[in-house]
Image (cartoon, rainbow, N blue to C red):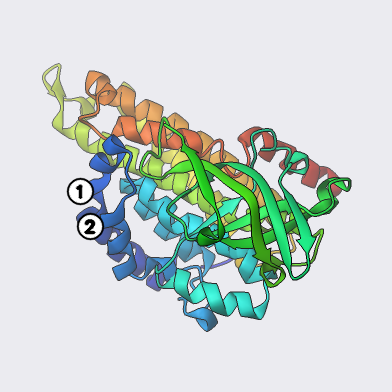
Amino acid sequence: MSASTFALTDVQRDFRDTLRAFCEEKVAPHAAEVDRNAEFPWKSFEACKEMELPALGIPEAYGGAGADMVTQAIAAEELSRVCASTSLTILISKLGMLPVMNWGSEELKREYMPRVAAGEIQASYCLSEADAGSDVAAMRTRAVRDGDDYVLTGSKYWITNAGISDVYIVFAKTDPDAGGRGISCFLVEKEWGIRIAKHEDKLGMRGSPTGEVVLDEVRVPASHRIGEEGQGFTVAMHTLDRSRPTIGAQAVGIGQGAIDYAAAYMKQRHAFGGPIADLQGLRFMLADMATRNEAARALVYRACALVDHDPDGELTSFGAMAKAFASDAAMSITIDAVQLLGGYGYTKDFPVERFLRDAKVTQIYEGTNQVQKVVIARELLKRV
């Protein structure tokens, strides 16, 4: 992608066109059923594996495609345009592997990343707790050293892919008196004793399970600690800086799906002697929706470019801006899409009400938009 114009390359455009056709054929037909039954989208995930989409964000040295972040954003957009739950099956394993990729030992990288790239295993990111969501330092999960192992005890809440994932990246306190400086990070295999206490019955993203992950004296080899003791908070924030732009991309995809469906409906629906697409008031709504989404897309691509080319620059603030702006735009766009369909938009026979429900969580997870504004302001004030 051009750093000056943010125009997509020919390769990225071809990838987008190919992926859009794939999503329409292999993912979209299952989206309504996945949402209705609140079931993991296995058929769509298997199709994504055939397209090698789980490999996009994994370096080539570890069996991945090594795709740039803008290309990964395009994939998140196109999947979310038809089924946001399916997009999470790709995004969440990448999120789980980011700490391994950037902070893990060579042994951990070679053991787990190729299997994630192949879609053989999936990963979850376990940071939040019941009373420690935005306030990460308040977590209570403990990790106590015992010889060559750590013993982990505690509960993690709001964990995406809970029960489906094979490995869990768990943040726990190795020094409970040190606040954020006492947090460490571990890779824990499900079979070592991970228990899923409950699954949430959610408003949206219903095809992506969200649950409580319980660790009751789970023994984890010290070799599976990611980074040094006490580095966990740094690992967590470093990871979220690089993941938040793809949540923005997910929101852009949801918004685009709503725009495309509403525009097609407006040309088919007749009232007052012609298609409602001829009514100026409704055309203005559609124009505003498209403008907001294009602005969000440009901000997301800028943040993604920073991940690849200038991660030590303004990534923290731009990642937060991209995530907050794009998710707010998605909510506004999907609300207007429901309005444009009138009574039909309020029913489950049409996908725009699902787009609206799916959009909401993009304002919440990986840091609420209120937290993003704290981050943005803090970064701006550093430079004054």
In whole angstroms, how far apart are the C-alphas of marks 1 and 2? 7 Å
Residue 232 position, x and y percent, is: 75, 57
Dots 1, 2 in contact, CB < 8 A: yes
Task: Name the residue nearer the viewer: 242 or 274.
Answer: 242
Residue positioned 40% across, 52% down in the render: 87
Task: Name the residue nearer the viewer: 235 or 122.
Answer: 122
Numbered label attached to residue 29: 1
Position of residue 229 relative to residue 363, above or below, is: below
Residue positioned 43% across, 32% down in the render: 202
The part of the image, by quadrant, that contains residue 31 is top left
Task: Name the residue nearer the viewer: 141 or 284.
Answer: 141
Residue 65 position, x and y percent, is: 45, 76
- SS for dot 1: helix
Look at label 1 and name its amino acid.
Pro
Q: Which residue is mark 2?
A: 26
Look at label 2 and name its amino acid.
Lys
Position of residue 345 relative to residue 156, above or below, is: above
Asked if residue 333 lies left or right of residue 180, the reply is left
Asked if residue 325 lies left or right of residue 221, the reply is left
Residue 383 position, x and y percent, is: 84, 49
